[in-house]
Image (spheres, rainbow, N blue to C red):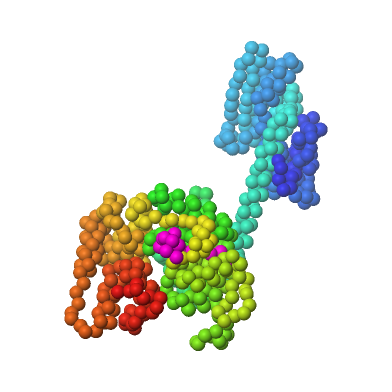
Amino acid sequence: MNGTKDPKFIAVYYDEKVALRGFAELDAFIYRTIISPPGPTLLEEIEKTCQETEISGVLTRGSLAWYLHEHHISVPIFDVKYDVKTIFRLIQGCVADGYCKIGIFEIDRTALPEDAIGLRDRLELSDCTVLYYKARDNENLRRTIEQLSRQGEIDIVVGDSEPLFIAQSLGLPNRPFYIDQYPWIGALTEACYLTEMTRKQASQDNFIEVITNIISEAVVIVDRAGQVKRCNRKGLQLFSNKAPQHTITEIVPGGMEELLAQTANQLMTICSRQYVANIVPLLIGTEEHYAVILNNVRYVEGMEMSIRKQNKNNGLAAKFTFDNIICQDEATRKLVKVAKKYARTNSTVLICGETGTGKEVFASSIHNASLRRDGPFVAINCATLSETLIESELFGYERGAFTGALQSGKAGLFELAHKGSIFLDEVGELPLRLQAKLLRVLQEKEIMRVGGSKVIPVDVRVIAATNQNLREMVRENKFREDLYYRLALLEIEIPPLRRRPGDIIPLFTDFLTETAEREGRSIYWNSPDVFTPLLTCRWSGNIRELRNLAERVALLCDGNKLTAATIESMLRRSDDSRQGEDQYSCGITGDLKAFERDYIEFLLRRFGGDRDQLCRFLHMSKTTLWRKLSRGAEEPREEDAGVEM
């Protein structure tokens, strides 16, 4: 009975003798007790009380309850039901007073057909007989009591107000149907519960009404015949007349037939304006209804432009979360579990793994699961820029710092990542001089722009990634040991795809479905066994190679049905193309630079465009490779001497 506000009830009795008073559990919730037989006076008293304060309901029983139901009072009526103890006590009292033919009478206007008299039960005891009757109304009740009394079937009448009034008018002995506090407390408990449920439902309805009135869509709820049952303010504005009753044909001339024929997000012209229409079926009780949701096309176009603009302006965002990681294999599940723990810290994370294993996906997921999720996520591939460019990109530069610099200067990626995370992909490609500068940033939490003279404090979490063995690079003096241990405070080793076979088929089907949806193709398969051939491949390109194959299958498979033979054929083509590329031939030429460039381009195709693998294969730096491909072979720089072909 505990709520935000205790409910108040009216207790109604037909006689003072049966009224309950002095019970704290009842008195705390009874605002007023009314002693009155059924009649206009009772209705007036109840209405007057309801005007004084908020009344949650009326507690009463028997014919009084039926009388109030019939006159539709403005508050709920809770009928107090008697229990077995009440009956036993009544019978015991009648027998003690010398009565052995006891008639218990009630009025029930629903349980019996009109003009019927019903003997509901007969109980033969050793010292008395108990008859239990129900009648539809006072007239039937009077006839029943008169007949039973004349036939000697009863010598006392037991009941509430109506049976007692009839018995008294006939001069028959009578006894009121007295009910003690326990049934009343039970009825009060139920009344409080139902009142609280009603209040919650009303609160929910009010909340829903508020929400539907503030949303941009017009919402109109109609029945199967098109009769409008409810609508929000936007929906009401569509109807031109002010009549209280509306039909959907006022705004959709074709009515329900036209609406139900529409597909999702269909354009419709309503009141000379275009709307995006959606029809949602609803079941209210047992009746079929429909919610017609209409969104103004101009509003939709405006929202789309706003979203595009915000996405463009807010490009520094992590694209992936842990929900995007498909982890059916046990190794990946354990890895994700560890990564989620790392995400809750602010420490640096080093993600290791072969090319194409999903290092950036894990970096994005760690950021989006961290306390910095609302901050920027800035990513840079350290292998894609020359030494000079990567320094200015990471730390920014002041105006006039070098030829071609912006007059206003430029903030670096560390500044842009303030209060967020920076992702340094291929961190092993950083030159040693920049490694020292990065170490200082990690230690001091401050940067200095190129050409600048002042330090700028930054609050940035560093997430680094590499496909190289940094420990071996440390031993070879190609990577600073102090920076390595600073980056590898928390380390994640992503296993290659061949070492987590449980992920291969789920990843492939996800890529396949994504490509098919994007290209408007419908592809299906009868059994997951069609993907078994995928498990025989080594997947040297890891997830990137798997995605490429899935896209080729989605685009090139004949028909809509996918079979194992189709996948095997695609795998063989991929293997054949790789084998064919193992042989290199070139015509005789005197241009050694052109020959070198041609051979490098051949190898680049052989490695699937992966410049990292090509550089390791040729023992060549990224800068030298870029120069040879873009300008042709040149004399090697000092730093590259002895490592090129």
The foreground one among 572 and 345 is 345
> At 52% across and 78% down in the image, what residue appears?
392
Report the magenta residues as a range.
460-477
Name of the residue lying farthest toward the right? 22
Q: Nearer the viewer, residue 15 or 425?
A: 425
The quarter of the picture where residue 592 lies is bottom left
Residue 199 is situated, as x and y percent measured from the top left of the image, at 66, 49
Residue 446, given in percent of the width and then of the height, sits at: 61, 70
At which x and y percent is residue 489? 53, 57
Is there any visible trace of residue 422 in the rendered image?
yes
Question: Is residue 469 a member of the stretch shown in magenta?
Answer: yes
Q: Which of the two residues, 415 or 78, is positioned nearer the viewer here?
A: 415
344 or 69, nearer to the observer: 344
Q: In x, y percent, where is residue 584?
A: 21, 72
Q: Is residue 60 above or below residue 632?
A: above
In the picture, the quarter occupied by the C terminus is bottom left
Residue at 18 percent of width and 79 percent of height: 587
Q: Is residue 331 magenta?
A: no
Furthest residue toward left: 588
Is 313 on the left-hand or right-hand side of 552? right
Asked which quadrant contains residue 618, the reply is bottom left
Quadrant of the image containing the N terminus: top right
Q: Residue at x 71, y 33 (%)?
A: 184
